[in-house]
Image (cartoon, helix red, strand yellow):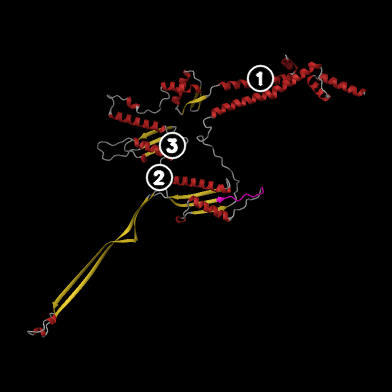
């Protein structure tokens, strides 16, 4: 009864306001209960083609299953997900879009020619390779083409096999993934080299660096290594000068040819005698002087006077030395740094007063920063490397680049739907609480206090006459006018 009396004591405007507030609270509570009682949705399948998705949806409709479609994803109630996957698998869903070795099971041994079997075999090979490539993270779609071997029985030269792989990877593929695809296809097909496999992405174009794209790949490697060095040097300098107050530009030139150098080094200071041979020879010659003289004509003359003797001695020594030798083979691979040029721009020191220009940095600080950069980058003056560090005031204020968090490293990745449900519940609860505390409760409280006062004395007992006049004018304008006239008459009589 007290609640009914309170409602009767309210004016029409407040009754409408109370009815609207109570209705809003009821709607909010109803939505809150409905949202809380709704089972959470879980991912059933994602990334299936349109044909397979249509068959899955048809089966779910036949099973009277509640589902939601969000792009290429199909969601069902979480408690029913595992059961539905088993049910769909029993019916062969989702079907593989690419056929593999099951194509060979459909061949008939009596009506199949060798050409038909060869064509079916290579189709099955391409399908199996496609299935394997689809298991690589980031690959949404793939297709493999293997070049046919046109060698006949009368040909002497065999044409090298080639293959191409077309993939759809919205997030791109790393160089290691591209090489993995090349080796996967090459090792699955005989007489196929990895560099003969071309990997093509539908948006980015050719990803493999085979053939004439070696120079482009080397240029990309230069840019990649230069950008990486720039980031490392920037991070190092910002630890001293502050974030956003250092700019680094790196120009790097890499070698693109392979070189092998073989040399033999002999150390003469380590000579050791290994063999010493000494030989001596002596020769003696004796003869008669053949000149005709008077003595030689005499019968008993001095015959010995014409005789002569000759003697020759020869000594020879051979010494063999063994010295330390060292064989050295150096192979220089492509990718070696031939020259490195680094330019560093440092912002001035921020002024203590607001609005003042930054102060230039000292020469000692710039020299220390330059030495730090040279050591961190591995600068070699012998090959012509150069580092320049300058301190100039930046025209633009330092800004902090915002980096979007990767979903793979985000701790709340994959919980968007749950967070959205929790947010909805919290919002509805806050709305219901606000309406109840700040709309419904004040109206009912004010009405009940007015009704209680009227029931107690028939008139509103308020000490302040101004407050009494305001309350009376809101509830009964005629009574307020009569009360005001009575006050005026009392003043005139006094």
Residue 134 sits inside the magenta stretch: no
- Who's the residue at 44% across and 45% down the image? 221
Q: CA distance from mark 2 to mark 3?
A: 18 Å
- Who's the residue at 91% across and 23% down the image? 492
Residue 235 image position (x, y, % from top left): 53, 46
- Which labelled disc corresponds to residue 244? none
Residue topped by disc 1 = 23
Q: State whether the magenta stretch is mostly helix, strand or loop.
A: loop
Of circles 2 and 1, the one toward us is 1
Helix, strand or loop for disc 3: strand
- Who's the residue at 50% across and 52% down the image? 374
Residue 162 image position (x, y, % from top left): 35, 38
Question: Reading the chain from its start, which is encountered first: label 2 or label 1?
Answer: 1
Question: Reading the chain from its start, which is encountered first: label 2 or label 3?
Answer: 3
Q: Are marks 2 and 3 in contact (CB under 8 Å)?
A: no
What range is drawn magenta here? 345-354
Could you say which quadrant of the image residue 264 lies in? bottom left
Residue topped by disc 2 = 214
Q: Nearer the viewer, residue 310 or 356?
A: 310
Residue topped by disc 3 = 201
Q: CA distance from mark 2 to mark 1?
A: 73 Å
Residue 232 image position (x, y, % from top left): 51, 46
Seen in the image, is 163 located left or right of residue 285?
A: right
- Vertical comparison of 59 with 217: above or below: above
């Amino acid at each position: 009864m007290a609640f009914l009396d309170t409602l009767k004591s309210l004016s029409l405007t407040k009754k409408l306001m109370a009815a609207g507030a109570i209705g809003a609270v009821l709607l909010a509570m109803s939505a809150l209960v409905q949202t809380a009682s709704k089972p959470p949705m879980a991912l059933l399948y994602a990334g299936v083609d349109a044909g397979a998705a249509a068959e899955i949806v048809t089966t779910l409709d036949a099973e009277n299953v509640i589902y939601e479609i969000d792009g290429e994803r199909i969601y069902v109630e979480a408690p029913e997900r595992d059961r539905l996957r088993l049910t769909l698998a029993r019916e062969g869903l989702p079907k593989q879009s690419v056929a593999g070795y099951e194509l060979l099971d459909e061949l008939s041994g009596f009506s199949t020619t060798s050409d038909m079997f060869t064509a079916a075999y290579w189709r099955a090979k391409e399908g199996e390779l496609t299935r394997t490539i689809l298991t690589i993270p980031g690959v949404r779609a793939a297709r493999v083409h293997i070049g046919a071997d046109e060698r006949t029985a009368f040909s002497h030269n065999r044409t090298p096999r080639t293959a191409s792989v077309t993939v759809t990877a919205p997030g791109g593929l790393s160089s290691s993934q591209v090489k993995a695809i090349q080796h996967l296809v090459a090792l699955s097909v005989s007489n196929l080299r990895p560099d003969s496999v071309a990997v093509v992405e539908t948006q980015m174009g050719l990803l493999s660096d085979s053939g004439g794209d070696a120079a482009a790949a080397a240029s990309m490697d230069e840019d990649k290594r230069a950008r990486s060095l720039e980031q490392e040097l920037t991070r190092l300098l910002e630890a001293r000068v502050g974030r956003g107050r250092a700019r680094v530009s790196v120009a790097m030139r890499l070698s693109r040819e392979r070189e092998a150098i073989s040399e033999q080094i002999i150390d003469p200071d380590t000579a050791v005698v290994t063999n010493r041979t000494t030989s001596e020879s002596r020769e003696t010659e004796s003869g008669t002087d053949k000149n005709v003289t008077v003595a030689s004509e005499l019968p008993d003359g001095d015959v010995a006077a014409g005789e002569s003797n000759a003697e020759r001695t020869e000594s020879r020594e051979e010494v063999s030395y063994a010295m330390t030798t060292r064989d050295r083979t150096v192979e220089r691979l492509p990718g070696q740094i031939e020259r490195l040029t680094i330019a560093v721009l440092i912002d001035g020191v921020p002024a203590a007063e607001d609005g003042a220009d930054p102060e230039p940095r000292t020469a000692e600080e710039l020299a220390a920063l330059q030495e730090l950069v040279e050591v961190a980058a591995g600068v070699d003056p012998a090959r012509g490397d150069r580092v320049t560090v300058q301190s100039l005031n930046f025209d633009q204020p330092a800004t902090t680049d915002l980096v979007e968090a990767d979903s793979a490293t985000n701790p709340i990745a994959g919980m968007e739907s749950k967070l959205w449900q929790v947010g909805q519940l919290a919002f509805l609860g806050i709305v219901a609480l606000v309406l109840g505390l700040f709309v419904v409760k004040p109206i009912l409280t004010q009405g009940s206090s007015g009704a209680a006062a009227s029931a107690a004395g028939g008139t509103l007992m308020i000490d302040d006459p101004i407050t009494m006049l305001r309350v009376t004018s809101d509830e009964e304008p005629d009574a307020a006018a009569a009360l005001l006239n009575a006050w005026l008459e009392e003043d005139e009589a006094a």
